[in-house]
Image: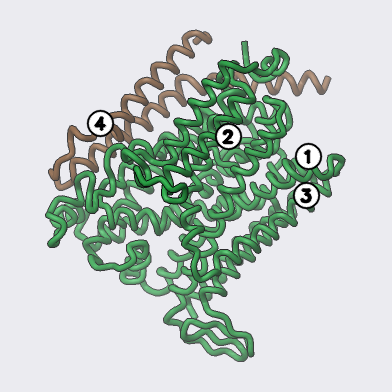
Chain colours: A brown, B green
Amino acid sequence: MNEQQKKSLFRKLLLVFAISFLMSNGPGVLLVNRATLVAGIPLLYLWAFAWGVVQIGLVLYAYFKLWRHEVEEEIQGMEDNAAGEGS
Amino acid sequence: MTPLIVIVLYLAVTFGIGTAAWWRGRVTADDYYISARSQGYVVTALAIMATFFSAFAMLGAPGMLYKGGIGFVFFMLNVPICGALIWIIGRPIWRLGKRHGYITPSDMIADYFTSDTLRVLIALLGIVYIIPYAVLQFKGGGYLFEVITRSSDVHAGFFTLSGGRISFGSVSLSTHLFGALLLASITMIYTIMGGMRAVCWTDVFQGGLLVIGMLVGGLITIWKLGGVTGLFEQVAAVSDAAHPAGEFITLPGPAKMFPVSMIFTFVLVASFGTMASPGQWMRYYSAKNPDALRKSMIIFAVVLTACYFFGTAFIGLGGKVLFPGLAEPDKVYLRIIESYLPLVLASFFVTTIMAAAMSTANGNLHAMSALVTKDIYARFFNKKAGQKELVWVGRTVIAAASAVSLWIALQPDIGMIVQIGLLSMAVSMQMFPSLIGPLYWKRATRAGTVWGILLGMAALLVTFQPAWFGVTAFGRSPLGIHYGFWGFMFNVAALYVVSLFTAPPNEEVQRRFHKG
């Protein structure tokens, strides 16, 4: 993945995260603001939990798809620098 | 006697870990303040978690659920944001710190903007954040010791523990005072000795304890209420003359505590404010490499979200069913463990709350010593101070800050400090826009950042306590927007506008900080 693709993916993930936050903690929560139990669990609790899972899922996706390569490149760069200083 | 033995064991293990860290360390400022940038991902993750979880998470948060119902669950969604921030801001902070040898937050901001004014402003914001936090943790420690030993009746030689007093011969103290003194002393001594390494190593132990404490507290609650559905069905049915059934599982909840505007803005204040606080900032510097931060992000986001949803939420909401008439909702977790566990286990779980208090206090006191030593002493009083001198000045600052915090915590009326404590996160959030220049926007200027902080703080104080300024047109958090977020909006607006009319840092500085 080149720099441009990484930036584009990061922006998309950020946008989805922002939308999920608007749904969980913003006006979206009013869609389900009812004293209803679904399978014995309050709708609002399930709503918050589900969006929490989406947000953690986005972080995990970025972890594997985006940031792992950056870390590998950065650690490689650090090792190269250290080797250069040592020689 | 049992509670005393359990508490002494917990404190002894914590102190032992702190001492081991001191043994391993070196007397250099780099090692003392940021562990020579050597912490791996387990230590980094648990240290960030333990600093994040204060006594509030174990006492105050369940209390908020008890009082205000399910709305507080939405505040828990600050955790995934905090997790992402560990990487999004933590990684560039780590990289710049390693490249330029930074130790404190002010080092980075002052270097980018070439400004001692900003160095002092950032250090002051950090100090205003830290002291009330430490006071509240010590106060919590005293309170816990008092609660757990109130039924003790021990007489052994010259030692007596009975009736809320602890005596050594003719010296007699209240258990509250003794508990606060004990917790503060142990925290202070190992932090002074081992610096960041001691803080992080003890945080690993304490972080593990508080995760166990929260999850087991949740399990006990659902066990007593017939499972998860049993718990929620009974919470949905909670009602009295003032509160109809179902109010506890809808927004804004009883007493209209959680309007949507508040859950939206407070979560942003809590996440950005906490993750930009000096203690967390220095944990980013102390990571061994970016991989430690990347893995910490995942551990933090997954483990803490689970703790909140399956621990805190169950304790607070279930507590409302189990103990409906509590005069002090903050005690709900203590009531649950006292009522349903044998004394030895209940004592153990009290130590998990102590762990939350100590792990927050130690990190913040340590960060404060760095701020005062590096940003004030070494900059304005002795520019030629050597490594050993910087470490010893830092140790003196920790001792002084601990003593002052303890003294404040022991005052009979700390209403004002509680008010300031409420401000802590909001104050810390005003540090966040100062990162915009060094990390993201080349056009940000020194004047813009200074004016942003000053106007942000002014807006924050006015919307926090309008009466202090003779304002009667609105109350705290106008329009249901958290006062910290008002400050943040003014801060960013001022930074943007003033930056457009003033000169940014020169190209050489920008090249050192920005890629491309």
Tell me the kind of residue under disc 3: Val
Alpha-carbon span between mark 2 and mark 4: 36 Å
Q: Nearer the viewer, residue B19 or B483?
A: B483
Is A47 above or below relative to B310?
A: above
Alpha-carbon span between mark 3 and mark 4: 50 Å
Q: Nearer the viewer, residue B171 or B207?
A: B171
Tell me the kind of residue under disc 4: Pro
- Measured from the top left, where is residue B371 in percent x and y? 68, 44
Dots 1 and 3 on the same chain: yes
Q: Which residue is mark 3?
A: B391
Subunit under mark 2: B
Between discs 1 and 3, the one toward the N terminus: 1
Mark seen at residue A27: 4
Between discs 3 and 2, the one toward the N terminus: 2
Mark seen at residue B292: 2
Disc 3 + disc 4, Cβ < 8 Å:
no
Of badges 3 and 2, nearer the viewer stands 3
Identified at 61% across, 30% down, the residue is: B450
Identified at 68% across, 36% down, the residue is: B119
Could you say whether the residue bearing mark 4 is in a helix, strand or loop?
Answer: helix
Dots 4 and 1 on the same chain: no
Q: Quadrant of the C terminus of chain B?
A: top right
Alpha-carbon span between mark 4 and mark 1: 48 Å
Subunit under mark 3: B
Tell me the kind of residue under disc 1: Arg
Residue B490 seen anywhere in this rendered image of the structure? yes
Q: Nearer the viewer, residue B501 or B187?
A: B501
Mark seen at residue B23: none
Mark seen at residue B379: 1
Tell me the kind of residue under disc 2: Ala
Q: Nearer the viewer, residue B148 or B173?
A: B173
